[in-house]
Image: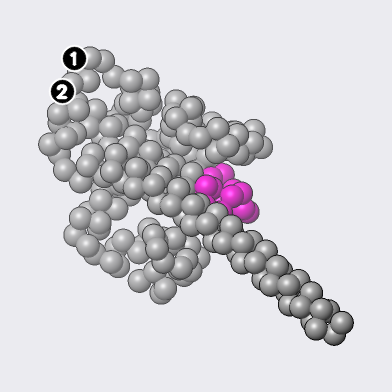
Amino acid sequence: MKDSRWLERVEIVAALSVVITLILLVVEVRGNTKALERQILLDRGSNVAVPFMEGPELLTAFEKVKAIDGWGALEAELMARYELEPAQAVAWMFFLYKVWTGMEADYVYAGSSDELASSIEGLLAFPDNRLYWRHSGDGYSADFRAYVESLVASSPRKELASSDREAQRAAIDDAYREWVGATNERDLDRWASFLATEPLFLPPDHPPLRGELAIR
């Protein structure tokens, strides 16, 4: 009788061990899947955007093609609103694409959070980002679109005076040139100057890095 009860207990413990192992495997697979999905989005953003930001050849070719085939609504509005040259409008459009794809990647990986909402609301405070989202938001996943639209609805829209728009345009041009220069020249100090006060960096296949010192 004692042996029978002992065997029953062993079987129960073994069954529980199997269940726990399966649960841990499901959690691990789900986490790996989200990390993979995030990395795919980040790679897509870089592969599409970086060639337009690092060299003039592709920008020049794109400009010539669009001069014949016609500009898209987003590029045309960027040129008209901010008085950008065609190449500048294209480069800025793809820069925004990379930024917003990064936001989507963080959403896919970690879901909604106060930190992500704050980052997106910060972007939406600028008319160029609202303009980008209005023209390009349909290109993102349905869940991410719904999340951003909820933030759009709750974020007050501020119209800038003409002088403010000119100052913002100049600041955008300066920041873009400085960021591209720092990236191409691998100048870590200049590159780090674009980081937030308490930055969070999520490199692929690496634990999250918090703070400028950790990122460096």
Q: Residue at x 61, y 66 (%)?
A: 21
> What secondary structure is marked by label 1?
helix
Task: Please indicate, yes or no, whether residue 179 appears anywhere in the rendered image.
Answer: yes
Q: Position of residue 199 (x, y in %)?
A: 47, 63
Judging by the rendered image, the residue that carries numbered circle 1 is: 68
Q: Marks 2 and 1: CB-CB under 8 Å?
A: yes
Q: Which is more toward the observer, 94 or 179? A: 94
Q: Position of residue 141 (x, y in %)?
A: 51, 35
Judging by the rendered image, the residue that carries numbered circle 2 is: 64
Magenta segment range? 106-121
Q: Residue at x 31, y 46 (%)?
A: 46
* Quadrant for the C terminus in the image: bottom left
Q: Which is more toward the observer, 32 or 170? A: 32
Q: Position of residue 99 (x, y in %)?
A: 41, 45
Say which amino acid is labelled 2.
Lys
Q: Position of residue 139 (x, y in %)?
A: 44, 30
Say which amino acid is labelled 1.
Ile
Identify the residue at the far right of this view: 1
* Quadrant for the N terminus in the image: bottom right
Answer few, some or many: residues within 10 Å of disc 1's Cα (few below 14, many 20 plus, some between 14 and 19).
few
Q: Which is more toward the observer, 212 or 169? A: 212
Q: Quadrant of residue 173?
A: top left
Q: Residue 28: say if magenta.
A: no
Task: Please indicate, yes or no, whether residue 172 appears anywhere in the rendered image.
Answer: no
Q: Is residue 178 left or right of residue 17?
A: left
Answer few, some or many: residues within 10 Å of disc 2's Cα (few below 14, many 20 plus, some between 14 and 19).
some
Q: Residue at x 20, y 18 (%)?
A: 67
Q: Quadrant of residue 115?
A: bottom right
